[in-house]
Image (cartoon, rainbow, N blue to C red):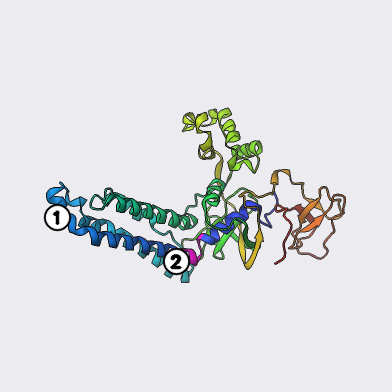
């Protein structure tokens, strides 16, 4: 497999998501949502605290069922959540990134306020829905910077389908092969990295201000590649019928959960089969630079139109072009369009030695601007 000198379609989506979720704007928007949640709690406590005495006397409440108990033990979790995000904002000046803290807040609320009987049913429902919404929103940041990385191609596919970023265009990216990171080490520059030679390995976000090391690439293993050949790039992860057939034919390779997956569960087969499809691989990583103010239109899907399984082999300069399409060479930055039967040019006096042309993973026509 040749170097990923340009991003394939799904890697473009992953890069767009990672840069979006780790942006300062997104971090500040989390803080705004937490403030709204705290404001809701303040209003509820102010209205309902006066009912504590009556609830204990007449409603058989325990002390743990009062608004005072919530204010003393559960409410501080919201303040700590806010403080964690505020600290993250401050640390950005030092190239330091961290999770938002939504998991800890959710756990404390669950432990200290499982039943808010001191509030009305409408208040409890509204607060619960708002809290879950904030936690899910913050989790997109936390998942982007958490180490070790657990995101795979399936994870990004799910995020792409549910995220609110534009699906009609993504920022333009440039793969910087001169900025190289290594699994287990702090990267030379803060930002998104693509694994070298792993077109199905998930992108990662690394940073230089401490605890921002790149992890191993989360890539398809041999079984995963077999599944890919069966259902195709577009079939990951939408061809649930095809994925279920593969799982059903290979039940002997898994003894930890597949026995519970039956035909009526086919719509949810992606997660259980994916547990057998990935492995971690140490590798080199190339920095993915986002070009400020430049965008490219996309088809809205996750996988795009690229097909790495059917691309031609690399060809030496001076040889005839085997297939019409976009090609690139490490000796030049830009892609070039050739028709079948044309002759690949030789790039003289380049720093890469012999000229080799490679089929571009992105076969879309470039747009101006």
Please give the name of the residue rendered at 21% of the width and 50% of the height, measured from the top-left corner: 65
Q: Main secondary structure of the magenta part?
A: helix
| Number of marks in the rendered image | 2
Please give the name of the residue rendered at 75% of the width and 59% of the height, measured from the top-left corner: 335
Residue 244 occupies quadrant: top right
Part of the protein shown in magenta: 21-26
**Residue 164, percent from left and from top:** 52, 56
Query: Position of 137 compared to 68: left or right?
Result: right
- Note whether residue 284 is visible: no
Please give the name of the residue rendered at 77% of the width and 55% of the height, measured from the top-left corner: 327
Q: Residues within 10 Å of mark 2 (few under 14, many from 20)?
A: some
Q: Is residue 231 above or below residue 15?
A: above
- Note whether residue 1 is visible: yes
**Residue 171, percent from left and from top:** 62, 62
* CA distance for labels 2 and 1: 39 Å
**Residue 26, percent from left and from top:** 48, 63
Mark 2, residue position: 28
Is 128 included in the stretch rendered in magenta? no
Mark 1, residue position: 53
Query: Position of 126 compared to 187: left or right?
Result: left
Asked if labels 1 and 2 touch by Cβ distance under 8 angstroms, the answer is no
Circle 2: element type:
helix
Q: Residues within 10 Å of mark 1 (few under 14, many from 20)?
A: few
First of labels 2, 1 by sequence position: 2
């Amino acid at each position: 497999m040749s170097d990923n000198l340009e991003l394939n379609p799904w890697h473009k989506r992953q890069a767009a998501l990672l840069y979006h979720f780790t942006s300062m704007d997104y971090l500040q928007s989390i803080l705004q949502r937490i403030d709204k949640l705290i404001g809701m709690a303040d209003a509820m406590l102010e209205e309902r605290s006066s009912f504590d005495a009556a609830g204990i006397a007449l409603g058989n409440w325990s002390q743990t069922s009062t608004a005072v108990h919530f204010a003393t033990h559960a409410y501080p979790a919201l303040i700590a959540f806010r403080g964690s995000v505020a600290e993250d904002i401050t640390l950005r000046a030092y190239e330091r990134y961290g999770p938002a803290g939504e998991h800890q807040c959710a756990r404390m609320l669950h432990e200290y306020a499982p039943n808010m009987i001191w509030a009305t049913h409408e208040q409890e429902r509204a607060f619960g829905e708002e809290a879950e919404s904030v936690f899910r929103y913050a989790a997109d940041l936390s998942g982007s910077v958490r180490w070790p990385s657990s995101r795979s191609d399936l994870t990004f596919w799910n995020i792409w389908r549910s995220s609110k970023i534009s699906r009609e265009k993504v920022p333009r990216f440039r793969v910087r092969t001169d900025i190289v990171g290594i699994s287990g080490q702090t990267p030379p520059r803060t930002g998104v990295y693509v694994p070298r030679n792993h077109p199905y390995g998930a992108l990662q976000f690394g940073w230089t201000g401490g605890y921002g090391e790149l992890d191993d690439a989360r890539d398809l293993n041999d079984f995963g590649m077999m599944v890919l050949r069966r259902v195709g790039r577009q079939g990951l992860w939408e061809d649930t019928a095809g994925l279920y057939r593969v799982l059903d034919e290979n039940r002997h390779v898994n003894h930890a959960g597949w026995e519970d997956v039956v035909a009526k569960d086919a719509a949810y087969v992606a997660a259980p089969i994916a547990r057998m499809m990935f492995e971690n691989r140490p590798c080199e990583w190339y920095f993915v630079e986002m070009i400020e103010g430049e965008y490219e239109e996309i088809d809205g899907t996750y996988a795009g139109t690229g097909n790495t399984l059917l691309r031609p082999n690399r060809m030496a300069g001076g040889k005839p072009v085997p297939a019409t399409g976009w090609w690139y060479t490490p000796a030049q930055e830009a892609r070039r369009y050739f028709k079948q039967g044309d002759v690949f040019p030789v790039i003289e006096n380049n720093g890469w030695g012999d000229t080799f042309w490679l089929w571009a993973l992105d076969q879309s026509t470039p747009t101006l601007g």
